[in-house]
Image (spheres, coloured by chain):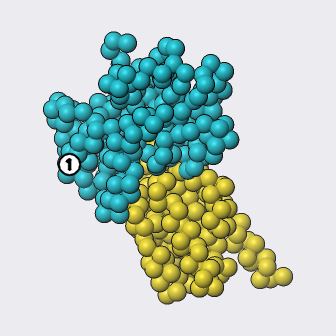
Amino acid sequence: MSDEEDDIILSELSDDELVLQMHDDLYDGMKEEIEESVHILLDRGWMPYDVLTKALVEGMRIVGIDFRDGILFVPEVLLAANAMKGGMFILKPLLAETGAPRLGNMLIGTVKGDIHDIGKNLVTMMMEGAGFEVKDLGINNPVENYLDELDSNEYDILGMSALLTTTMPYMKVVIDTMIEQGIRDDYVVLVGGAPLNEEFGKAIGADAYCRDAAVAVETAKEFMDRKHNQMSA
Amino acid sequence: MTQISDAELTENGLTEMAAGRILLIACGALAREILDLKKANGWDHMDLTCLPAKLHLYPEKITEAVIGAVAKHRASYDEIFVVYADCGTGGLLQTACDELGVQMVLGPHCYSFFEGNERFADISESEFTAFYLTDFLVRQFEAFIIKPMGLDRHPELRDMYFGNYEKLVYQAQTDDPALTEKAKEAAETLGLAFERRLTGYGDLEVTLKAL
């Protein structure tokens, strides 16, 4: 950030300028500025859903592209995500009140023996940003955690994450248990994590492997579209 | 070979060709250990070439780099042995080695084979909140942990990375008080409890001895 940019007074920007500035601020991980801008747009009468999609999600989409292209790295993505989290915290209660579109319900968690959650948290945030309701089971989840929660509430999608070569096979344990219980086909199962790949996803019987948060969102949307098309056919 | 620079091993790896009939294609993070073992055991039938240790920061690049190294050296050796474990390749390195007809080290990663794969598997259920460092990683803590994770520029990210960990286990290959002190400092930096475990070379020595 240059000194010149430090002098920007967010409240004096037009809506269009402010949204572009928010994309820049997200890119630079400036949480306080994002929170201030969210408040400004809401005060100007913007719908929370529009603030979310046009400013935050679009900003994170740009971050995601540059991460994929090797322009941004994990630390920068984490700072951007932290800034988006600040904005989401303000918007989340308002989204429910204002009837923002709901695309589906997702259950997500890191598998047993694995404590890594950076990727999972990014997916959770981006899925919420895209209009999914997400229940996050956190880290180190045995199969019972997933199945109990699937049984207790209505979900469309199960997401599982693992960062370790040693823990990723546990995803198959969960899927096989779902098959045994005859519930596998009731859900779309998405898997992700650094050591995973497309082949592994297929081999364990997942519906799709998602290499990053943006792909997870797009994949989830596609499956929900297919589901709705099947239901209306 | 006189002094090997860790920075050189990180960025460029190592080529120490002689007249052996077996070529070890190894991770740069294992160069010193392998050279120590070669020297201690008189394994003159093995040559060593190392890929840059920094590939560990991009495990998706390891398989391709190993395939390239095998292709480059295959004609010059009777046998090639890959001194990588799975190392975050999700089985792709093993598949590639199988296709190339070369052997590699068993196990998920160097923390496991230094500990001994069997023992590591036994303790992993109770120790999955441990963050491991080897001699090399202690020496290269800034280059491999602090800088790539952006903790030098953004120390506030520390708990996002390490908040779920409880302790740092320093798997010592050698008995070096200065390294132990550095490992302790690393644990403090990351906000983790500290444990030192003298593993020696573990399954690495057993595996290479069998060649």
The answer to whether residue A51 is left or right of residue B189 is right
Q: Return the residue at label 1.
A: B195
Q: Amino acid at mark 1?
A: Glu
Q: Residue at x 44, y 78 (%)?
A: A145
Q: Residue at x 80, y 82 (%)?
A: A232
Q: Residue at x 34, y 42 (%)?
A: B202
- Number of numbered callouts drawn: 1
Visual hue assigned to chain A = yellow
Pick the front one: B47 or B168: B47
Pick the front one: B137 or B174: B174
Q: Is residue B3 visible?
A: yes
Pick the front one: A91 or A12: A91
For the colour cyan, the matching chain is B
The answer to whether residue A101 is left or right of residue B43 is right
Is B192 situated above or below A88? above
Is the N terminus of chain B in the top left, top right, bottom left or bottom right quadrant?
A: top left
Element class at badge 1: strand
Residue ranking furthest to the bottom: A152
Pick the front one: B57 or B201: B201
Residue ranking furthest to the right: A233
Disc 1: host chain:
B
Q: Residue at x 62, y 53 (%)?
A: A197
The image quadrant of residue A7 is: top left
The answer to whether residue A104 is left or right of residue B82 is right
> Percent from the top left, x then y, of residue B136?
33, 32
> Percent from the top left, x then y, of residue A94?
48, 73
Q: Is residue A11 visible?
A: no
> Percent from the top left, x then y, of residue A205?
65, 68
Is B165 situated above or below B74? below
